[in-house]
Image: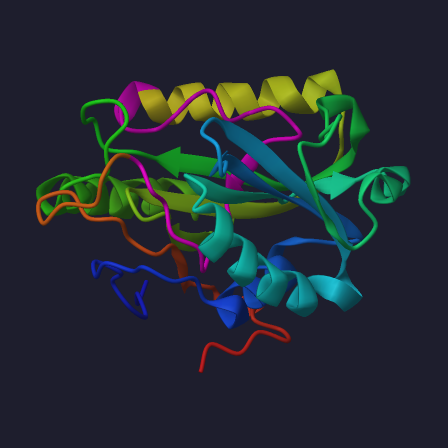
Amino acid sequence: MTIITENSKTATEIDPIEIARALNQFCVGITEIRLLNCQGSYGGTFTVSGYFDRQHFLCAAFELKKLDAKFRPKGCYFIFNEIYSGCHARAFNRFLERPERTTSDKEILSRRWIFVDIDPPRPPGVSASDDEKEQAVEIREKVFEKLKVIAEPIVADSGNGFHLYIPINRPNTDEQTKLVQRLLKGLESKFPMVDITTSNAARITKLYGTTGRKGDSTPERPHRQSKIIYVPDYLKEGWNLQ
């Protein structure tokens, strides 16, 4: 595996082009983009959510850049599995503050990806240090070797750790959820940095091209921009990393 870039630099802005690339890589039909812990003008936090089809991914990415500057959310996320199209009407190609509903597991039509989250141990509510990120790199390489027996995965830098994705196309059933749970538990038994809580069908994950803001950004624990760092050749159709 050749990693295109190691993403260790801090980032204060988000990258709309990277966001649109990520959405096009992972999503079919519509997706939900969700901003968590947005900062209100008079204190308190709230969620922003929107549902977008493929024709509006780039527009969503540029609108997200404005919202990120305005609300400074702790994180921006998306759903990578296939969502029931009727959910689109909740916020039709637009963002909505304080939505009444977001996507539930029952509203996922099919599982498109098996998602593996590698997160180095650290105090809650803070970003990873460079040393912690380096530990996660070692685990990422070992998990990659395990997963490529099934299929070579996409690899992404979440800012604080790493994500790996294996493409599948399975119906959203209890049986499929249990299969994913068994896979994650098997990996976690060998690599404790693997998160076993990510098996639900409506799982949200970091929207690549956006910045995570856990705690304050310090020299030891900086905020970093997330990014896809490896796409295997068989998944590169229509994908331009230049």
Q: Is residue 103 above or below residue 32?
A: above
Question: Residue 205: within the magenta?
Answer: yes
Q: Residue at x 72, y 25 (%)?
A: 104
Q: Residue at x 84, y 44 (%)?
A: 88
Where is residue 42 drawn, in percent x and y?
A: 48, 32
Magenta stretch: residue 199 in it?
yes
Q: Quadrant of the N terminus?
A: bottom left
Count of numbered labels shown in the rendering:
0
Q: Could you tell me residue 7's position as x and y percent? A: 26, 60
* Percent x, y of residue 238: 64, 76
- Whether residue 235 is visible to the viewer of this picture, yes or no, is no
The quarter of the picture where residue 186 lies is top left
Q: Is residue 177 visible?
A: yes
- Magenta range is 189-214
Query: What residue is drawn where x is 31% and y is 48%?
Result: 159
Give the image location of residue 137, x and y in percent: 21, 47
* For residue 40, side relative to residue 194 (left or right): right
